[in-house]
Image: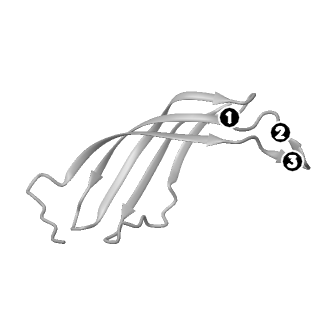
Amino acid sequence: MDYVLLPGRNLFLLLELNGVSTARAERAGQTVRNSGGHLLFLSPGIQYLPIPPLILEGSVQVPIYRDFNGRQLAPDYSVARSAISPNAIKTPWPAWICARSRS
């Protein structure tokens, strides 16, 4: 496969929809009442191709839907980053580098 970068065409805008669904936790054989739920994020971001075939990506995940079981901390936003190698395997960078929660 041959990669060709066109001048000025190696920066892309993204808009993703991401979600997380978590089951209720258990402690000492008992179900934890205030645990588990659903989160849906709208994630605008950018992709940059500095050299073929390396792809750098970053996005901000903003929750648009929250359905928690009971009272829990919820993120106001999260910042994600990744690098995709020539084999299309994401690097082991931490996916979540920043998150702010409110009580």
Label 3: which residue? 27
Cα distance between the residues tagged 2 and 1: 15 Å
Residue 17: x %, y % from top left:
42, 38
| Residue 44 can be seen, yes or no | yes
Q: Which mark is in front, 3 or 1?
A: 3
Q: Are marks 2 and 3 in contact (CB under 8 Å)?
A: yes
Quadrant assignment for the C terminus: top right
| Residue 75 can be seen, yes or no | no
* 61 up-or-down from 70: above or below: below
Label 1: which residue? 73
Which residue shows up at 44% across the image and 67% down it? 91
The dot on residue 32 is 2
Report helix, strand or loop for mark 3.
strand
Q: What residue type is labelled 3?
A: Arg
Q: Which amino acid does label 2 sit on?
A: Val
Q: Do the residues labelled 3 and 1 touch (CB within 8 Å)?
A: no
Report helix, strand or loop for mark 1.
loop
Check disc 3: other Cα within 10 Å, few if <14, some if 14-19, many if 20+.
few
Which residue shows up at 83% across the image and 39% down it? 32
Of 61 and 37, which appears nearest the observer?
A: 37
Q: Which mark sits nearer the N-terminus, 2 or 3?
A: 3
Residue 88: x %, y % from top left:
36, 66
Residue 64: x %, y % from top left:
49, 28
Check disc 1: other Cα within 10 Å, few if <14, some if 14-19, many if 20+.
few
Cα distance between the residues tagged 3 and 1: 18 Å
Q: Which amino acid does label 1 sit on?
A: Leu
Q: Which mark sits nearer the N-terminus, 3 or 1?
A: 3
* 20 up-or-down from 82: above or below: above
Would you identify the image quadrant in which residue 52 lies?
A: bottom left
Q: Which mark is in front, 2 or 1?
A: 2
